[in-house]
Image: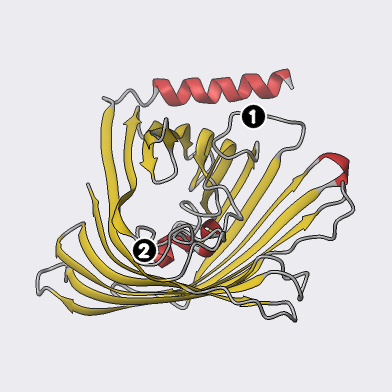
Amino acid sequence: MKKFLLAILCLISVSIVTAQEKPKDKFNGILFGDYFYKISGDSSGSSGQYSPYNKDVQGFMIRRTRFHYEHIFNDDFSGNIGFESNDITKLDNKVSFIMYDANLEWKNVVPYSSFLFGLMPTPAYVWGQAEKMYGYRPVEKTIADKNGLEAAVDIGVMMKGNFDKESKYGYLVMIGNGKGLSPAVSRYLKYYGSLYAKIYGDFLVEGFFDYQAGANDMYRYTVKGLAGYKNKHNEFTIEPVLQYRNNADNGVAPVNPFGVSVHAKYNLSRKTDKDESEVVNAFARYDYFDPNSNNGSVGFRENFINVGIDIIPIKNFHIIPNLWMTSYKDKSPANIERKSDVVGRITFWFAY
């Protein structure tokens, strides 16, 4: 073990000595929010974003403001730190900021791969393929994120990279605390992994898996897939997800959330410049979600629909009129009615 650690230290020293370049700085950020009007639905007590509001409630929201700084020491070493405010981060009921990114990255530690340590996005979202293929996070989260099946960030270590020079085949593996933004630790770590492959040009597939044990023989794992097509201006994806939650500590039957998301974007207009900059896009999304597919007679199944027009007057600035709707279907014989949440929105989104 001592020889192994010594070899690692030597490699790091060589990398630092042979790459004494002037440090570089990168700063970027994003902001998105909406004007919304609740067209239909009552305060139902469900977990949906607009479920707490009664019909005819309206207002303005800033759903996310993010600042990110990257310090590039040289070609192989960089550090990241980022802060964000969103619609659920509040201190004394006021808008507040949290740290969502704080890590060190060692690039090319093995060919085409990087090693990271710290607080970072998990393979489920930002560094996985789901959000990249979907492309409309400022309008709504991807299905697993939207329904709280995965934490967007975690504290731990990660290896990510590609198996080939052309980046057609890639992977991410991570070991984390499994506590999200919380600094809490326990004896039970969380293990993440994903593999993806670009096939037939613009087609891509990805498989994702995570596992975390708990006290008293409790454990949970998530299986998620992605298949999609994305060229320069149009895209289509399908994303199924299943989570198994074993509740061995209290004798309750396992809870298995299950869902499928389908999304499409089509370019309606673009400029005649060299980059063929997009001006107007149309998009639509449908989600089916059952919070407990293991029980067919308790709870509600959810059907989510989001459609809109993406207007891009200048690069990285979007104005997006869209309709957000979730309907509910009672699984019990009682056929309990829960009114659909229907919300009209104008979403504003810019990046810099």
- Answer with left or right where residue 124 lies relative to residue 87: right
- Disc with the residue nearer the chain's start (1 vs 2): 2
**Residue 328, located in which quarter of the rendered image?**
bottom right
Location of residue 62 with respect to 322 vertically, above or below: above
In the rendering, which numbered label is found on residue 124? Answer: none
| In the image, residue 112 above or below residue 242 | above
Residue 150's spot in the image, x, y percent? 59, 52
The amino acid at mark 1 is Ala
Q: Quadrant of the N terminus?
A: top right
Residue visible at 48% across and 57% down in the picture: 52
Circle 1 residue: 184
- Say which residue label 2 marks: 136
Which is nearer the eye, 1 or 326?
Answer: 326
Amino acid found under the numbered disc labelled 2: Tyr
Q: Secondary structure at mark 1?
A: loop
Instruction: State the CA–CA distance, disc 1 to disc 2.
Output: 32 Å
Tell me the quarter of the picture where residue 72 sits.
Answer: top left
Who is closer to the viewer here, 244 or 295?
A: 295
Residue occupying the point 47% across, 40% down = 108
Q: Is residue 167 visible?
A: no
Q: Position of residue 250 (x, y in %)?
A: 87, 48
Residue 25 point in image, percent of width and height: 26, 31
Determine crowd level at label 2: few under 14, some 14-19, many 20+ residues with C-alpha closer than 10 A.
some
